[in-house]
Structures are given as structure tokens and as C-alpha cells.
Amino acid sequence: MPKIGVEQSLTAVQQELQSMGYDVVQLKQEQDAQGCDCCVITGQDQNVMGVQDAAIKGSVINAHGMSAQEVCQQVEQKLGHQQ
């Protein structure tokens, strides 16, 4: 199952992804993003943790203005080829 990094403040997104069976990791610092297939950020400060640098090889989803369900749909679209 893909590993998804989710910024701490996005608890609804974390819970939704966990209920879908994803391995969810809280992003507290840059190294938490390593090994993640996809990361979900709030978009408050797009590069606050360096996630958009080379920290991850996967996709970065900006959750700003989206519901938890919309974010999960984005995750599934980005990872669709991996499942």
C-alpha cells in the first residue's frame, strides 16, 4: 500500500486516507517525507518543510480549499498507476 505523508493540521485528510487503507505518516519535518509516495500539504506556506525540494520523489498535493474527500480523490488519481 502506498505511503502518504500528510501535514499535521490536516487531521480529516489523515483519517480519510487511513480509512481507505493507506499508510499515513504525519509530516512534522522534512525527513518525514522521505519514502512517501505522495505528500499532502496545506498550502499555507508551500515550501515550509522543503517538501517541494528533492525530499520526495512522489507527488505533492496542495490541499488548500479542498475537502478531505477531494484530497483523497487527488491522491488516488496520482497513485492510480501504482495500485
Image (cartoon, rainbow, N blue to C red):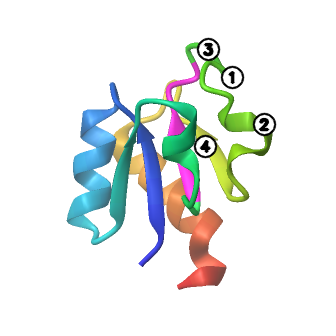
Q: Earlier in the sequence, mark 4 or mark 3?
A: 3
Amino acid at circle 3: Asp
Q: CA distance from mark 2 to mark 4?
A: 14 Å
Q: Residue at x 26, y 35 (%)?
A: 11
In-image side of 50 versus 3 (left or right): right
40 is within the stretch colored magenta:
yes
Q: Is residue 82 above or below residue 31?
A: below
In front: 71, or 39? Answer: 39
Position of residue 60 measured from the top left corner of the image (x, y, whole percent): 65, 45
Q: Main secondary structure of the magenta part?
A: strand
Depicted 18 relative to depicted 32: above or below: below
The quarter in which the N terminus is drawn is bottom left
Question: Residue 29: percent from the left, percent from the top?
Answer: 49, 30
Disc 2 marks which residue? 53
**Which amino acid type is marked by label 1?**
Asn
Amino acid type shown at disc 2: Asp
CB atoms of marks 3 and 1 within 8 Å:
yes
Residue type beneath disc 4: Ile
Circle 1 residue = 47
> Which range of residues does the magenta coloring cover?
38-43
**Label 4, label 3: how many angstroms apart (C-alpha)?**
13 Å
Cα distance, mark 2 to mark 3? 13 Å
| Relative side of 70 to 59, left or right | left
Residue at which label 4 appears: 61
Helix, strand or loop for disc 1: loop
- Residue carrying label 3: 45
Sequence-first disc among 2 and 4:
2
Give the spatial CA distance, label 2 vs label 1: 8 Å
**Res 23 → quadrant:** bottom left
How packed mark 1 is, by other alpha carbons closer than 10 Å (few <14, some 14-19, many 20 or more), is few
